[in-house]
């Protein structure tokens, strides 16, 4: 069996997230069906770097699958895309070492959370950005976010998930930028807790609107209590940007 | 009755075009229903600068309507948007002179046609750009487009429309630009024939792919024969950008 590494981009709007759930359209199930058709194999099992939730998008999700397929490399990407719907595309495919595992081997992941704070939400961005009617102070959000960088227990930014061994993660990059009426929060870490980026986004938006002082973010982090942080921001603003391997 | 001028933006993907057609979701019908609810009037009739076809988008469509409504100006935009779905928004509303008519008074309209010539179409742009698997030479398209500027009989770029008095129009601006894997063709004119921008786009794409020499565009224009020009490019790449009044 050969092991293939895929880089995927998908518009999460019409998927019930990554993971297969009977009766729902999911990225995993759509991809596995396409690969089964392509390879003629009964069942192709795909591992992703991590699950994305319903409505969450990917610019560079990474997955791997094992197959005996013999399509020449130059034609493989086109052949895979020919079997995929237009809201899920493979950006690249390459043969990986036999041991490569998209989830286990991921060193870091980067997410982007996009917010529009114009008066009226754009009909073209309604699926791809969270809308804030109140203007946001991006500079205040950037300053407030600083204490989150580094290694911390992020329990305050975690939606409970059964049997999670530890809530300690390391944020290696965190930035808030603005261009026109759009802001984006970029977060890279060695791993993410459930809804962690969306909880950080909801918290920073409360600072950006002036509801909370900048200093509150450090207090929330220390509290290790989810009820202290802001709301989980909506899924449509979230993009998995890229996954880094050794 | 007061006369109101609206600037509208809509994602045309889920509309069967501007004009009301029984049994279909159209921009006009959606807008007129919203305004009827808002004003409490039985029927509000909206005039647009022109119809857009199914799947065509608007960044700045202009429309006007007459109403007795008395909502204070400062709250009117929010009140209108509160009655509209998220794929149709009013960007501005203002009282216009009683004689203002969005179609009759339009001096010029500008359209943009967007094309993606990357190897794999982006799942996020599938509704907002035409995809060309073959790379396009934007500079050749720009040179080829030059003879279209000015006043000409554009019958070669017109899908037949009954009782059209004349196919003579004046193109006041025409440019082809590229950024990364995206190209856009901007066309401004004193009026447009049916499918004119999409026929120009389909023709220039044939030049951009190297199927036709640059000189062929002038020949097509002279022929005043629709069968000489390229295909009508798909609706999803087309945006009505703005309408200019005196």
Image (cartoon, coloured by chain):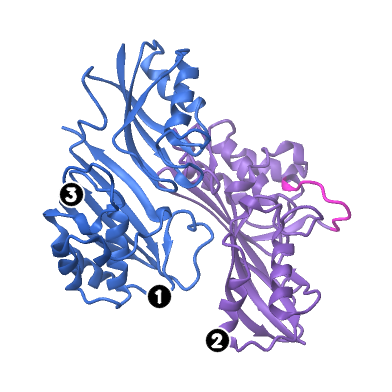
Chain colours: A purple, B blue
Residue displayed at 48% across by 12% down: B40
Q: Chain of mark 3?
A: B
- Residue reaching furthest to the left: B151
**Residue B207 placement (x, y as % from top left):** 27, 72
CA distance for labels 1 and 2: 16 Å
- Residue reaching furthest to the right: A163
Dot label at residue B167: 3
Q: What residue is shown with label 2? A: A74
Q: Chain of mark 1?
A: B
Residue displayed at 28% across by 69% down: B138
Residues tagged by mark 1 and mark 2 found on one chain of the structure: no
- Residue reaching furthest to the front: B162
Q: Nearer the viewer, residue A170 or A238?
A: A238
Observer-side mark, 3 or 1, equals 3
A160 inside magenta stretch: yes
Magenta part, dominant SS: loop
Q: What residue is shown with label 1? A: B134
Q: Which label's residue is closer to the chain start, 3 or 1? A: 1
**Magenta segment boundaries in residue numbering:** A157-165
The answer to whether residue A98 is left or right of residue B114 is right
Q: Are marks 1 and 2 in contact (CB under 8 Å)?
A: no
């Amino acid at each position: 069996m050969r092991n293939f590494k895929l880089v995927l981009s998908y518009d999460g709007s019409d998927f019930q997230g990554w993971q297969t759930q009977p009766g729902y359209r999911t990225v995993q199930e759509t991809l596995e069906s396409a690969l089964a058709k392509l390879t003629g194999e009964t069942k192709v099992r795909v591992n992703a770097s991590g699950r994305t939730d319903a409505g969450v998008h990917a610019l560079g999700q990474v997955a791997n699958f094992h197959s005996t397929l013999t399509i020449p490399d130059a034609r493989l990407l086109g052949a895979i895309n020919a079997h995929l719907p237009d809201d899920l595309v493979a950006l690249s495919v390459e043969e990986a070492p036999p041991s490569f595992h998209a989830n286990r081997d991921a060193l870091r992941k980067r997410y982007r959370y996009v917010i529009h704070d114009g008066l009226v939400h754009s009909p073209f961005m309604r699926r791809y950005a969270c809308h804030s009617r109140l203007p946001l102070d991006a500079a205040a959000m950037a300053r407030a976010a600083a204490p989150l960088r580094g290694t911390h227990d992020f329990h305050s930014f975690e939606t409970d998930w059964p049997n999670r061994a530890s809530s300690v993660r390391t944020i290696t990059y965190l930035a808030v930028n603005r261009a026109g009426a759009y802001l984006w929060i970029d977060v890279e870490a060695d791993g993410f807790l459930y809804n962690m980026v969306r909880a950080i986004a909801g918290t920073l938006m409360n600072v950006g609107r002036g509801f909370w002082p900048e200093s509150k973010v450090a207090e929330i982090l220390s509290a290790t209590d989810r009820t202290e942080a802001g709301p989980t921001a909506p899924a449509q603003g979230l993009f998995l940007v890229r996954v880094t391997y050794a």
